[in-house]
Image (cartoon, rainbow, N blue to C red):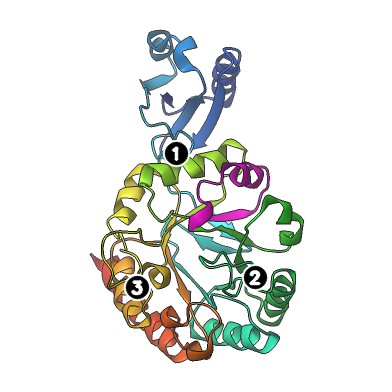
Amino acid sequence: MIAVLKHGVSESQAENLINWIKAQDVDVHLSEGQYQTVIGLIGDTTKIDIDLLASLEIIESVTRISEPFKSANRKFHPDDTVVDINGIKVGGGNFQIIAGPCSIESPEQITEVARAVKEAGATLLRGGAFKPRTSPYDFQGLKGEGLELLLHAKEQTGMPIVTEIMNANHLPMFEHVDVIQVGARNMQNFELLKELGRTKKVILLKRGLANTMKELLMSAEYIMAGGNENIILCERGVRTFETYTRNTLDLAAVPMLKELTHLPVVVDPSHATGLSRLVKPMSLAAAACGADGLMIEVHNNPQKALCDGAQSLTPEQFRDVVSAVNKIRAVVKEL
């Protein structure tokens, strides 16, 4: 249930209303937008007399929300959420590019790639230290050593870092990580999501291999229910019957999610397609359909990459993609 306050309601009037709602054992989410203030009621709202609430002098309107995701719902929070990562903003018209290798392999590799992607226009550095692989015999990442190398690259370049967590027990190791990524395979690892909800870290939440948008938003709700609203959603393709690409990139999910939620949405064309030659056209399409950013894999020598070399761009290819994306964004702004 949401209650929209009339324009000009005083702070004391709003506070009295919130206290009354809380007295009914219902939690409150307050969203103060540019043009209106929305009070979201979370919990067993059957205890609230909707007619009584609507009759109050300070209430503009009251609406019941049928969707199970409440805090992530745009009805609760009409304005776009802008996630701030050390001064780098995502959402609300702010577009950022996250780039770096699928897996951290050596000090030279991660530092060289970090410097190259920063020079080309990336604003956040990604790199995998813990790698979930389909086969137990594939390279699983450098783990703690990889995190140390990623932090060193952060010191060298000043770029905030993004890396994936596999286990809630690893959280102490992520103290200096700026954005914690929840990978597709962990999107519904609810115990992990609950733990991340207790942190204040920015969470990049990837859509699962075969999950609906509603399920993605419910996973975001788990994190938000714990008090952490610093969430970026990531569309990375879903598994279909198609075999020519690694996954099928659901770009329709971007504008659809924008209708459903206030959270920023970025697109990962690398994992979506699995083919480096498709990253550029899908990046352009993602920028055109309203994404708040891109997440692109870049390796200084993709042929020798220990993980996902086929979908990784060289620094030169990445520079070309950034240039083309900036041109598309300039056109979209004029429409």
Secondary structure of the residue carrying tag 1 is loop
Q: Which mark is residue 77?
A: 1
Q: Can residue 276 be seen in the rendering of this structure?
A: yes
Q: In this figure, which residue is indicated by the disc labeled 2?
A: 129
**Residue drawn at (69%, 69%) of the image:** 143
Q: In this figure, which residue is indicated by the disc labeled 3?
A: 283
Q: Say whether residue 29 is left or right of residue 148.
A: left
Look at the picture and state if 198 lies above or below 271: above
Residue type at numbered disc 1: His
Q: Say whether residue 30 is left or right of residue 209.
A: right
Question: Of marks 3 and 2, which one's residue comes earlier in the chain?
Answer: 2
Q: Residues within 10 Å of mark 1 (few under 14, many from 20)?
A: many
Of tags 1 and 3, the one toward the viewer is 3
Secondary structure of the residue carrying tag 3 is helix
Of tags 1 and 2, the one toward the viewer is 2
Per the model, the C-alpha gap separating discs 1 and 3 is: 28 Å
Secondary structure of the residue carrying tag 2 is loop
Residue type at numbered disc 2: Ala
What stretch of residues is rendered in magenta? Answer: 184-204
Q: How many marks?
A: 3
